Amino acid sequence: MGAAISLQLEIARAAQERAVKLVREQLSGFDSEKIERDPCARRARNEVESWERLQARFTDSKGLGCWKIGIDSLFREMSVAKT
C-alpha cells in the first residue's frame, strides 16, 4: 500500500511541475505591465506563484502526512481556479 501511495504522490508532483512550467512558458510572452492589466493573465500568475509556494513548502518535508496535505491543497486550489 505504501508503494502505491508513493507512486501516486510522485505522479501528482510531476503533473504539478508540468503545469507550473506550462503556465510560466505561456506567461513569458507577456511583459509585467500587460499581466497587471489583463485579469486572466494576472490570475494565472498569482495561481502559479501559489503553486510554487506550496511546492516549496513541501519539497523538503519528511513524512507522508505532509505530502498528502500538500497534494490535497494543490488539487483543491486547482479545482477552484478552473471555476
Image (tube, grey):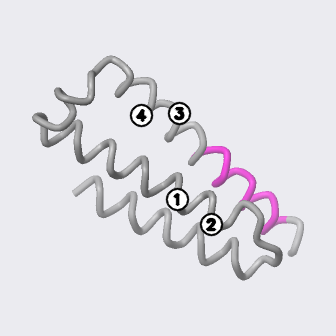
Say the numbered circle drawn on residue 1. none
Residue identified by numbered label 2? 57
Q: Residue furthest front?
A: 33
Say the numbered circle drawn on residue 21. 3
* The N terminus - image quarter: bottom right
Circles 4 and 1 in contact, beta carbons < 8 Å: no
User: Which of the two residues, 45 or 68, is positioned nearer the viewer here?
Assistant: 45
Numbered disc total: 4
First in residue order: circle 3 vs circle 2: 3
- Residues packed near mark 2 inside 10 Å, few (<14), some (14 to 19) or many (20 plus): few
User: Which of the two residues, 23 or 53, is positioned nearer the viewer here?
Assistant: 53
Q: In what element is the residue under mark 4?
A: helix
Q: In what element is the residue under mark 2?
A: helix
Residue identified by numbered label 4? 23
Q: Which residues are magenta?
A: 4-15
- The image shows residue 80 at horizontal and vertical percentages of 30, 63
State the residue at coordinates (62%, 66%).
Answer: 57
Disc 4 marks which amino acid? Val
Say the numbered circle drawn on residue 53. 1
State the residue at coordinates (17%, 27%).
Answer: 34
- Residues packed near mark 4 inside 10 Å, few (<14), some (14 to 19) or many (20 plus): some
Is 29 drawn above or below residue 74 in the view shown? above
- The answer to whether 22 appears left or right of 58 in the picture is left
State the residue at coordinates (57%, 48%).
Answer: 16
- The image shows residue 73 at horizontal and vertical percentages of 49, 71
Circles 2 and 1 in contact, beta carbons < 8 Å: yes
- The image shows residue 8 at horizontal and vertical percentages of 72, 60
Q: CA distance from mark 4 to mark 2?
A: 20 Å
State the residue at coordinates (82%, 78%).
Answer: 63
Q: In what element is the residue under mark 1?
A: helix
